[in-house]
Amino acid sequence: MNKNVRKAVIAGNWKMNMTPSETAKLLSGLIPMVKGKNGCDIVVCVPFVDLMTAVTLTAGTNIKVGAQNVHFEKKGAFTGEISADMLKECGAEYVVIGHSERRQYFGETDATVNLRLKAALAADLTPILCVGELLDERDRGITTEVVSMQTKIALLDVSAEDMSKVIIAYEPVWAIGTGRTATAEQAEEVCAVIRSVVAEKYGTEVAESVTIQYGGSMKPSNAAELLAKVNVDGGLIGGASLVASDFTAIIDAAQ
Ligand code: PEP
């Protein structure tokens, strides 16, 4: 197992925060703070309406831009939805798929996550696929089964070539926005399970190259310990990504 074959990806998930003018302010602070920090890829996943501002402001910097969701159809009568081609043309390079808040509040299922993932790949967007167990599932001792099943369904009909473009984020639902972080050992254990699911389907070479992030109350004080784990290749960061100095400190921990 060689962690060095994978570049860490530190991605901020801004959720439903930041208007375009607030986006400009946050990024204007962040851009100089992370300049030259090329030891990891840096991504900000912003609300749809902030994409153009974010893409324009980060042009020529080491920050890349992503969206937080994508619809699976190419176009048509899907009022309020956004297609992968739309995101691509706006300059987004990444898209979060299957975040637990989408699953919990907006009825996303493993099946629609699979469709969205394939739509993103077809448009040449890098999907950040989120999987993770509920607290009740962890307490009942079925974390491995739940996360393996979510991963397997999300990757149905995804080719090995496409798989090498997918980022997976292990996000225990009980740790998201709660201030309660998984221990580094818990994160490592489940990230290793996810890698073994990928290896089973695509072989070791592909599995070794796949970036697997941890997400769930990652912050400056716990980032280094989490990121040091051999199967944890980066972080998906909510709350702390809204504060430029905190996000930068996490990026520093990943260098
Ligand atoms: C997230 O939104 O994916 C997340 C991990 O949030 P937080 O860091 O706030 O727990």
Image (cartoon, helix red, strand yellow):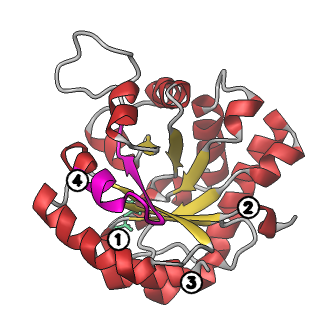
Q: Which residue is mark 3?
A: 253
Q: Secondary structure at mark 2?
A: loop
Identify the element where label 1 is drawn: helix
Q: CA distance from mark 3 to mark 4?
A: 27 Å
Q: Which residues are magenta?
A: 53-69
- Disc 3 versus disc 2: distance between alpha carbons? 16 Å
Q: Earlier in the sequence, mark 1 or mark 3?
A: 1
The answer to whether mark 1 is within 8 Å of ligand 1 is yes
State which tag comes first along the sequence, 3 or 2.
2
Measure the alpha-carbon separation of dots 1 and 2.
Answer: 22 Å
The amino acid type, in three-letter code, at marker 1 is Ser
**Depicted 207 relative to depicted 161: above or below:** below
Which residue is the extreme one toward the bottom? Answer: 221
Reply above or below: 220 against 233.
below
Cα–Cα gap, marks 1 and 4:
17 Å
Quarter of the view holding residue 102:
top left
Q: Which residue is mark 1?
A: 241
Left or right of 217? Residue 138 is: right
Q: Quadrant of the N terminus?
A: bottom right
Name the spot of residue 118 as percent of width and height, x first: 54, 26
Residue 21 in view, yes or no: yes
Residue drawn at x 81%, y 53% is 208
Can you tell which mark lies on residue 53?
Answer: 4
Residue 220 locus on image (x, y percent): 45, 86
Q: Dot 3: what SS?
A: helix
> Is-magenta flag for residue 160?
no
Residue on which disc 2 sits: 6
Location of the C terminus (image quadrant) = bottom right
Q: Is residue 57 magenta?
A: yes
In this orientation, which residue lies closer to the viewer: 100 or 231? 231
Q: Earlier in the sequence, mark 1 or mark 2?
A: 2
Q: Is residue 113 above or below residue 182?
A: above
